[in-house]
Amino acid sequence: DTEVTQTPKHLVMGMTNKKSLKCEQHMGHRAMYWYKQKAKKPPELMFVYSYEKLSINESVPSRFSPECPNSSLLNLHLHALQPEDSALYLCASSRGQGGLTNEKLFFGSGTQLSVL
Amino acid sequence: KQEVTQIPAALSVPEGENLVLNCSFTDSAIYNLQWFRQDPGKGLTSLLLIQSSQREQTSGRLNASLDKSSGRSTLYIAASQPGDSATYLCAVKRNRDDKIIFGKGTRLHILP
């Protein structure tokens, strides 16, 4: 299994809603990432988890709350989002265990989020 | 501050042609460089990863080169096919624990 699975694929939410994005991988990877991508722009890093601990937070607003319940799962909890938060949210993973062959990022297909 | 630039932003070529995509970066002290492919509305697929000590990597019809001293990388695609149409992104990593910096990508369209 070389896949990173993201659910849901599409999400429409109001500014007062609470929702969660989910990401799952079974490749034994110990580093997991959340990226945000606006149309025709490159991905922007939001969070990095290494061995289930938050290692990088790119000054993301608190209305985005990441969670890593175990080594295979990564969630992104959303609350009180703004319309400008509408974007493609991508999850990625890498082996994160050092070594020259362990740097490749494997991306999920993303969740297309629309905030109304 | 590391900046990654990809030129051109968009490229259309007839099927069967060989082509080169360019990537430049401002700080030559990099840990590795990756080339990704992204189809519309989809995630990214890592195509090739070049460590800072390497000069090139090959996979099938793809060949990526790295010249750290000049801050340049190229992705060579041989015998292009319509299925190669996608956005190609270049990304560099400054050191092992640092984040990846993406270029804005080149949108490639292969004409049947």
Image (tube, rainbow, N blue to C red):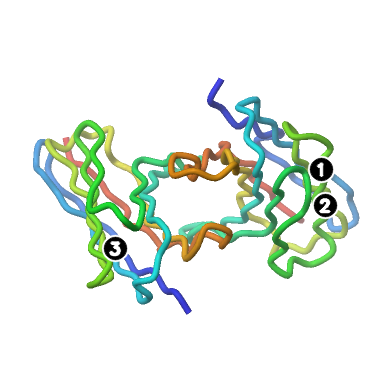
* Quadrant into which the C terminus of chain A falls: bottom right
Q: Residues within 10 Å of mark 3 (few under 14, many from 20)?
A: many
Asked whether the residues under marks 1 and 2 belong to the same chain, the reply is yes
Secondary structure of the residue carrying tag 2 is strand
Q: Which residue is mark 1?
A: A20
Position of B60 compared to A18: left or right? left
**Separation of marks 1 and 3 at Cα, in angstroms:** 36 Å
What numbered label is drawn on residue A78? 2
User: Which numbered mark, 2 or 3, is in the foreground of this view?
Assistant: 3
Residue B101 in percent (x, y) is at 48, 63
Residue drawn at x 30%, y 63% as measured from the top left:
B9
In the image, residue A24 above or below residue A100: above
Residue A91 in percent (x, y) is at 63, 43
Q: Which residue is mark 3?
A: B23
Instruction: Please identify the residue farthest to the left as the structure is shown.
Output: B17
* Quadrant into which the N terminus of chain A falls: top right
Residue drawn at x 23%, y 72% as measured from the top left:
B70
Look at label 2 and name its amino acid: Leu
**Separation of marks 1 and 2 at Cα, in angstroms:** 6 Å
User: Which image quarter: residue B24?
Assistant: bottom left
